[in-house]
Each structure stands twice: as C-alpha cells, then as structure tokens.
Amino acid sequence: MECGSTPTDGCYINGNTTFNLDTYNLPNGVVFNKSDIFLDCNEATLSGSGSGNGISLSGFDNLEIKNCNIENYATGIQLNYNADNNQIFSNRIRNTTTGIGILRADYNQIYDNDFEDNSKNVYLYTDSGYSLYNSIYSNNFNGGDYGIITGSWDYWYAAYNAIKD
C-alpha cells in the first residue's frame, strides 16, 4: 500500500511524499520503493514498538528524508545495499538501538539531525564489502553509548558534530 499523506503501517513510498502533522503508530515503519524522490515528514512522529526500522531504504538512490521525528525502533533509518547518494537531514531520532544504520551504502550525507538517547547514534557497518564516502556533519548527539561508530575500515567524513552526555 502506498503511504500518501497519512502513512499506514508498513506502507511504501513510491513518489514525493509529505506527511500530515500527527503521531503515527507504525511498528513496521515505512519503506522507500523508488529512487529520485523525497519524504518530508512535516514534523510528524513515526513511533515503533522497539523493533524493526522506522524508515527503510535498500538499493534506491538520490532520496531525501527530512523533518521526521522517529522514536522507539531498533533502527530509526536503515540504508542497505547500494542505497547511495541520499540526503538525511533535519530529523529527530530518539530512543532507538541505532539511530541511522548504513550497511554497504555509499556517498550518503547525514546532517543537521538531532539524536537523543540512542545506543548507537550513527552506525556504519558491513557484512562483506564497504560503506564508502559517507559524510556525517553538523549533527547533535545527546545521550547514548556512541556518537558515530564504524564496524569496518570505511572511508567516511565526520565534522562539526556536537556530542553531549
């Protein structure tokens, strides 16, 4: 089912999408299903049940994710396998195990986000291969165990991030 302006649990984002301002209980989150589109949450809150992903993208490129409040997922935003050249900005991600997870995805920009009380705020990792040339800058990390953690020898850039206890 396509998300539209009022997302339903597990819906797909197939085109440029702006959510209505509200709080949505979405244990299975939302899933990108196309390249070259954007999601503007319009300050809406996506709330999970402590497992799964709030927003998932796998193999889609040139996406924009902005103005989302994401809470109570295992991973707030998950980029998988060739999800390249994406921009994730102006989001608030809180109370997740991993705020943003990047698995074998390259050339992504993560900036101007607020991370609160996540165990791992940004996690670049790999099963085999690399996550290359990802830029992480101008974010605020408040609480949690790790600001930025990498599980492999990735080429990545991080600057101007504020990390607070």
Image (cartoon, rainbow, N blue to C red):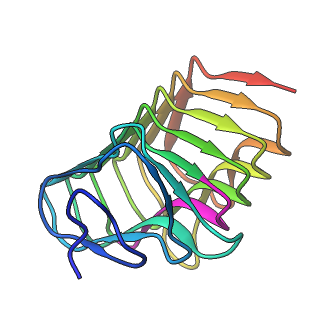
Q: Specify the quadrant of the image occupied by residue 47.
A: bottom right
Check the picture and name the quadrant holding the N terminus.
bottom left
Q: Which residue lies furthest to the bottom in this view?
A: 1
Residue 6 lies left or right of residue 38; in this view the side is right
- Determine the image quadrant of residue 48: bottom right
Q: Is residue 124 left or right of residue 9?
A: right
In this picture, is 68 found above or below 165? below
The spot of residue 77 in percent (x, y) is 50, 58
Of residues 84 and 48, the one drawn nearer to the viewer in this rendering:
48
Stretch in magenta:
71-81
Outermost residue toward the front? Answer: 22
Is 119 colored magenta in this rendering? no
What residue do we see at 33% from left, 65% from top? Answer: 7
Query: In this orientation, which residue lies closer to the viewer: 85 or 97?
Result: 97
Residue displayed at 87% across by 27% down: 165
What predominant SS class does the magenta segment belong to?
A: strand
How many tags in the picture? 0
Q: Is 164 placed above or below 38 here?
A: above
Question: Within the magenta stretch, is there residue 80?
Answer: yes
Q: Position of residue 154 (x, y in %)?
A: 55, 53
Q: Quadrant of residue 160?
A: top right
Can you give x and y, in whole percent of width and height, for residue 52 in the image? 59, 76
In front here: 10 or 31? 10
Percent coordinates x, y for residue 50 in the rendering: 71, 69
Judge left or right: residue 19 versus residue 135: left
